[in-house]
Image (cartoon, coloured by chain):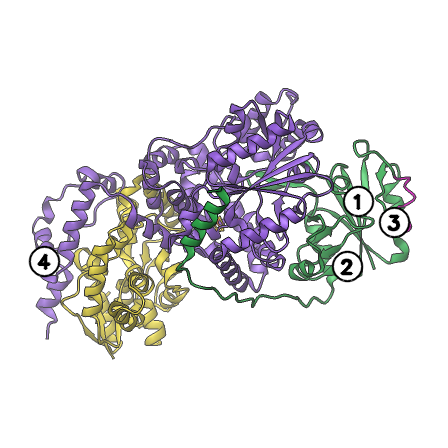
Chain colours: A green, B yellow, C purple
Amino acid sequence: MSAREEILGRIRRAVRDAPEVEIPRDYRTSVPVDDPVGLFAERVDDYRAVVHVLPAAEVPAKVAELVRGRRMIVPDGLPDEWTGGAAGGAELSGADGVVTGCAVAIAETGTIVLDAGPGQGTRAQTLVPDYHLCVVRADQVVASVPEAVARLDPVRPLTWISGPSATSDIELNRVEGVHGPRTLEVIVSI
Amino acid sequence: MRVALFITCVNDTLFPGTGKAVVSLLRRLGCEVDFPAAQTCCGQMHVNTGYRADGVRLARHFTEVFSGYDAVVAPSGSCAAMVREQYPKLVRPGSRGAAAVAEVAPKVYELSEFLVDVLKVEDVGAYFPHRVTYHPTCHSLRGLRLGDRPARLLSRVRGLELVPLPAADECCGFGGTFAVKNPAVSAAMGADKVRNVLGTGVEVLCAADNSCLMHLGGTLDRQKAGVRVMHLAEILATTEATG
Amino acid sequence: MSGTFLGMPGNFPKNAEKAVQNSQLRFNLRKATHTIRGKRASVVAELPDWKELRAAAKAVKDETLRHLDRYLVQLEEAVTRAGGHVHWARDAAEANRIVTGLVQATGESEVVKVKSMATQEIGLNEALAEHGITAYETDLAELIVQLGDDFPSHILVPAIHRNRAEIREIFLEKMPETPDGLSDEPAALAEAARLHLRERFLRSKVAISGANFMIAETGTLVVLESEGNGRMCLTLPETLISVVGIEKLLPSWRDLEIFLQLLPRSSTGERMNPYTSMWTGATEGQEFHLVLLDNGRTDVLADEVGRQALRCIRCSACLNVCPVYERTGGHAYGSVYPGPIGAILTPQLRGMGSELDASLPYASSLCGACFDVCPVAIDIPEVLVDLRAKAPHGAAERAGMRVAGWVLGDEARLAKAQRLASRVRGLVPRRLPGPLSAWTDTRDLPEIPEESFRDWWERHERP
Ligand code: SF4
């Protein structure tokens, strides 16, 4: 018998008399938040990431200021006004930073989610450079995790990012900066 | 109200003073107290040590002895939790045993629960002019969820100064046969608990379980720490006349 | 190379006795567990629906286990459709054989690894080493354990027993490129690890991971992590091999909305962990293999009481809150799964044939703190008590418990025993002999009263 058949057979025997289960979903699937952008900014800041909340018109200048002097990766499909005039096209190993958009952002947890869509780059592009600048549109901010899950497509490769790379492995104290980008900067465009 | 006292085997054998205190306290509050003489032990030690068949026999005996009372009061959070929480898991659903458990178990109360929830008193008229800290034993805290009932009772005792115990919710390390099966860990946990007790500068350590107090009191005595242990019932039973 | 726990001698009480005397270990553990307890409590308190999330998580896991066969087949189809390859492993040896073969087929002799309990459980690193393949752990704590030739002692933070000064020593000794001036600041230590692994990440062709969740409906795998080493391993190498226990399944994509709230808050005490990666099948040109591991899980599944242990999402909240774990550390449990969950999982996965495994169900005071914090509501005390009933008992203990049961079985016998005790009360020595010396070594005995309560009642109160 193949391992597959044997394991499936063992499972069937094991659960033969197990009761059926009802799943109570009484938890919050949407959370009323007065100011999702404000909450998002506050929570991102808690991770010691840098956050700017700016009117859309001011975003291009801010991006330009932040990317000046850095060798940036500019992923395909990033709106022109978010490139900050960076030439882009930096090699993965030689890049200092990357600027991206995102698929969705979560206020309650201060999370941004990338789904490798237009303007978000490949997973490696947002990982290897030491600086990640992410521009979030206000309408991409949802209040809670369930609302984010509902908006995402699992078939795409997803990366959920909550603050810069960190570790709690030394005395269970969080320190920022291990293998992923050590600086995460987020601009919320309102 | 007519209540049955479930003294518990440990109190019966080693701490009769606690039983006497419960009797005088409940009578003072107007209850008629009955002591069903056929009672022995709830079976906790056997069940929790892995001797389920013996435990089940004792549980059956318990449900027979205490059937028919309005309320059964036990001066032990641990034994009350055994009956209420664990008995239902020991019986086969639909069996005669299950019916007996369903009849008796919900009527079993730990002392502070009985006072606060059933008799609806918090001021029991006690007088105890001493500095006291309270250790909420695990089965009282996480099994029965007694919450602040004991503290409410103690804070209404005249003359009593209740000092909060740091890290109160941590286990003292007794754990029944754990105390002898894992003596090193049990002693280490007891030492930490005792250190916290001594840090409060109290005269008396109080709890609703004499088994935990036996472990902590034994540790305190060995250290000649000068802090005595008292069951909640003993403090609540003390009045200006008796104290 | 870190060792394997299998066949470790001794028993829990003996291991624990040694551990509690190690003041450095006690200090490190106390500090770490108390830090994390506080953090967990505050982020859990933030969610007003924690109770509901917990109830939902418990039910989702139970429902998954009830139909595990169906969901596994569904997962296999989805992963295959997305270009991945699915392998099934009955036990550790079979899983190790499969992974070794897959690595050999790439022609590589080095792999990078993301921290994974399943691969530790099966001793994968050791099995690969036997075939000349070197596995490099990339998680900081795993790296500390691996470099220090040590055993993991915690599910989430395997080097929790080490403090910053000890970690610095290990790095200086085992990482040649580390400058002598390395400080013991956590940030400096993390930086040293970053430099040590950087090149290896960019060079490696094969990575091995586990997964926190697998979604049956979509074939998606989910890995939560903090450092970015997971992202490095999951995205950069050409071949990715994930070894995952069959119980790590969730039926639908939507179920993640529950578990992505429960897990980070329970484990590192954060609202969300820094990085979560989700991928479905072969992604961005990668070759992807999924090895589904049984290794005793179906035996656990067959146990009506014990099967709830398979709900575990390895958050480690139960370890962090456990008063026994806090004082003994993880090594005393002799298993990659220490603490309360280890005390119920190890004896079920390995059986209770060894002295060590038979002692694990007793490694608890049944204080219930673990059950309280468990995000999937595993009633660990209930399973412990159930396992105790199945554990082998020594002859002396059996005899003692039989006598106790006989005496307690009847009030007349109990009264007689009490009177006997009262009569000899003056003769009880301060230190008891035999197994009961375990009590009197550190504690005084209570005084035996002149009269039991029942005799007092009989004399005074009987109407
Ligand atoms: S048993 Fe519960 S608390 Fe412990 S690791 Fe598993 S999920 Fe977490």
Q: Is residue C184 visible?
A: no
Q: State the separation of the CA atoms marked 1 and 2.
A: 18 Å
Q: Quadrant of residue C106?
A: top right
Using the image, tell me which numbered label, if any, was put on residue A82.
Answer: 3
Tell me residue B171's x, y (percent): 38, 51
Q: Which residues are magenta?
A: A77-88
Tell me residue B108's x, y (percent): 29, 69
**Image height check: is B100 above or below C311?**
below
Is the residue at mark 4 in contact range of ligand 1, meaning its CB lies under 8 Å from it?
no
Tell me residue C365's x, y (percent): 34, 49
Q: Are marks 4 and 1 on the same chain?
A: no
Q: Identify the chain of the residue marked 2, using the numbered disc in the image.
A: A
Q: Secondary structure at mark 3?
A: helix
In the rendered image, which residue does mark 1 sit on?
A121
Using the image, tell me which numbered label, if any, was put on residue A140.
Answer: 2
Using the image, tell me which numbered label, if any, was put on residue C413.
Answer: 4
Sequence order check, earlier mark of 3 and 2: 3
Task: Check the image and name the residue furthest to the front.
Answer: A1
Q: Nearer the viewer, mark 4 or mark 2?
A: 2
In the rendered structure, which amino acid carries the disc numbered 2?
A: Gln
Q: State the separation of the CA atoms marked 3 and 1.
A: 14 Å
In the rendered structure, which amino acid carries the disc numbered 3?
A: Trp
Q: What secondary structure is the stretch in magenta mostly built from? A: loop
**Image height check: is B63 above or below A54?**
below
Front residue of C123/C38: it is C123
Sequence order check, earlier mark of 1 and 2: 1
